[in-house]
Image (cartoon, rainbow, N blue to C red):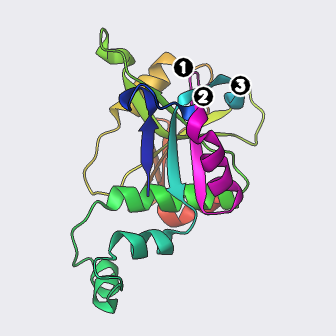
Amino acid sequence: MKKKFNMSELDENLRYRNYEGAFYWLEDAGLVNIVYNTTEPNIGLGQRIDNNSLKCYMFDTGLLLSMTFNEKGIVSNEIYKKILFDKLTFNEGILMENIVAQMLVSKSHKLYFFSRNDREDSKDTMEVDFLILSSSVTSKHNIIPIEVKSGDRYTYSSLNKLNKKYKDYLDESIIIHTKDLKEENNILYLPIYMTELL
């Protein structure tokens, strides 16, 4: 259940501070993983949080599936079979991002994403799914940008823009996808099951 909350789009009487406690409660209860938008992919990601923008993922992907396909109060086993055998068309990107968030949290990563919308200059408009800290020490600031891709054909223009603009802050970029492991143009392509190794 990825939902990006942008408080500026809600009723002007509603503010993040009105719901902040509820988000913390859900996270502390182990029901959701909250991903905070950082305003700069630099060391100290938590110091640059945009409190008006966050993503919320279900902690349990199985529960997400059950809630998503719960049309009659009960989820049919047929739905699970269709998902397993790739016979059901739905937004798999939501499911993939939720799985990746769950796996990163299980490896003790604090989750951040990077989103910037610049109406005047499209080259500064970008959104990258996750930013985590690298465990290795290099001359860079060790931020690893991660994009999650569910389909066979995809683009990653936001990742390219981020790499170009913030190259001194970033370690090798990662695309988590459903295909094989490879490295190309300073991007590591990881099969989703290898997320656990990050």
Q: Which residue is rendered at x = 67% and y = 48% of the image?
A: 24
Q: CA separation, marks 2 and 3?
A: 17 Å
Residue 105 in which image quadrant: bottom right
In the rendered image, residue 54, in percent from the top left (x then y), is placed at 52, 38
For residue 47, the mark is 3
Label tally: 3
Q: Secondary structure at mark 3?
A: helix
Image coordinates for residue 27, horizontal then vertical, percent: 65, 54
Q: Are marks 2 and 3 in contact (CB under 8 Å)?
A: no
Assign a secondary structure to mark 2.
loop
- The residue sitting at 57% across, 41% down in the picture is 19
Amino acid type at image mark 1: Tyr
The single residue placed furthest to the bottom in the displayed view is: 77
Give the label on residue 170, or none.
Answer: 2
The residue positioned 69% from the left and 49% from the top of the image is: 109
- Tag 3: amino acid: Gln
Quick one: quadrant of the N terminus? bottom left
User: Pointer 2: residues within 10 angstroms few (<14), some, or many (20+)?
Assistant: many
Q: Is residue 191 visible?
A: no
Question: Residue tagged by mark 1?
Answer: 166
Pointer 2 and pointer 1: residues touching (CB < 8 Å)?
Answer: yes
Query: Where's residue 98, x and y in %?
Result: 48, 58
Q: Which residue is painted at 67% across and 53% down in the image?
A: 25
In magenta, the rendered stretch is 17-41
Q: Residues within 10 Å of mark 3 (few under 14, many from 20)?
A: few
